Image (spheres, rainbow, N blue to C red):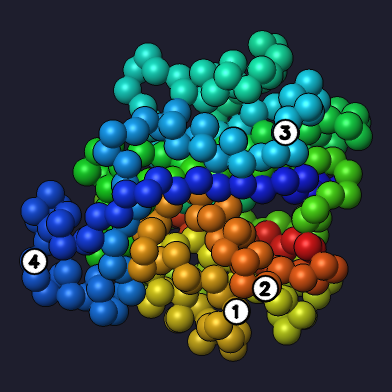
Amino acid sequence: MTSLFAVSDHLPSGRVPIEALAGEYGLTPMELRIFRRYHGLGEVARDPGGSLLDLLRGAAAGLAALRGREHRVRYVLHARSFPTVVPFPHDPVRELCTELGLDEGVPVFSVGHHACASGLLAIDAAGRLLAADGDPDALALVLAGEKAFTPEAGMVPGSSFFGEGAGACLVSPVDGRDRVLAYAADLRGEFDTDAEEQSLEFQRIYGEALAATVLVAVERAGLALEAVTAVLPHNVNRAAWHQVCRLLGYPRERVVLDNVPAVGHVFCADHFVNHRTARQRGLLRRGEPYVLAAAGAGRGATFAAMVLQH
C-alpha cells in the first residue's frame, strides 16, 4: 500500500500578468489574447528575488506532520519537469535536507523522466521503495517545484506559462490520509523529436491520450469514472482540460482549474497546489476517490493518472 501521509504547497506572493512577459517570449498581441481568452491564463506566480531553495523550504514548512518524524524519512525525491533546475554546483534539495535535520545518509535523488507528470512518478517510486524496505514506520519526502530561470522553463509555446511555486508530501507504506488505489502511465517515445509534424501529432492526440490514461487508472482501481469526486490536473490551461472533460463525459466543475488563471503551470507541483484548493472547496471527502492527472512533454511524451482515496 502507498499513501500520502501529509500534503503541502507554497506559492510566492508575486504575480506577473502575461502581458508583461510578451517581450521576453516574443509574443504578439493576438497570441496574448488567445492565452487569456481561450486558454484561460491571466497571470503567473513568480518570485524574482527568491531561489529554488526558498520555494522548497516554503512547501516543507507546511508539512506539520514532518516535525518530530524527521528520523523516519528514508528517501527524498525531487520531481522535476526539466533535467537541470539550478546552475552547477548548487544543490538546494540537499541544503533543505540539512535544514530539516534529516539523516545525512538518507538517499536524495531527482525524478524527471516524465517531464511535468514526474510528480506522479515520484509518488509511485517512493511507495515502491518503502514497500521493498518493509518498515511500516518509514516515510519518503517527495518535493516538487522549479524556477522559471531560462526561457525554456518560462513558457510552453502555444499552451501555457510556467509559474513558480513548490509542493511537498510525505509518502507512507501504510494507510494514511490519502491512499493510492492505482497508477497508470502511457509513455510515447515517438515524440522524442523536434520535427514539426510530430509536434502537430502530439497536439492532435493529446486529449484522447490523456483521457484514455485516466480511464485506465480508474479501471485499475476497480471503479467507474462516475465514482470519482474530483480531478486534480496539471495546470497547463483550461482549454486542454475542457477537451478532456468532453471526451470523458466528466463534469468540468469537478476538475480543479481554479489556479490556472492566477498561478500558471507550476511544473510538477500543480497537484499539490490543487490538493489544497480541492480541500478548501470540499471536493475531497472521506472515503471517496479522486484522480491526479498530468501530461508531460520533453524527450518523448508521458500521459499519467493516479487514483487516490481520501
Mark number, residue 28? 4
Q: Which residue is mark 3?
A: 66
Q: Which residue is mark 2?
A: 283
Asked which secondary structure carries label 2, the reply is loop
Tell me how far mark 3 sits from mark 2, CA to CA.
25 Å
Tell me how far mark 1 sits from mark 4, CA to CA.
33 Å
Q: Residue 81 in the image: x percent, y percent?
A: 44, 44
Q: Earlier in the sequence, mark 2 or mark 4?
A: 4
Tell me how far mark 3 sits from mark 4, CA to CA.
46 Å
Q: Amino acid at mark 4?
A: Thr
Tell me how far mark 1 sits from mark 3, CA to CA.
30 Å
Residue 162 appears in the figure: no
87 or 113, which is in the foreground? 87
Q: Earlier in the sequence, mark 1 or mark 4?
A: 4
Mark 2 nearby-residue class (10 Å; few <14, some 14–19, many ≥20): some
Q: Amino acid at mark 3?
A: Leu
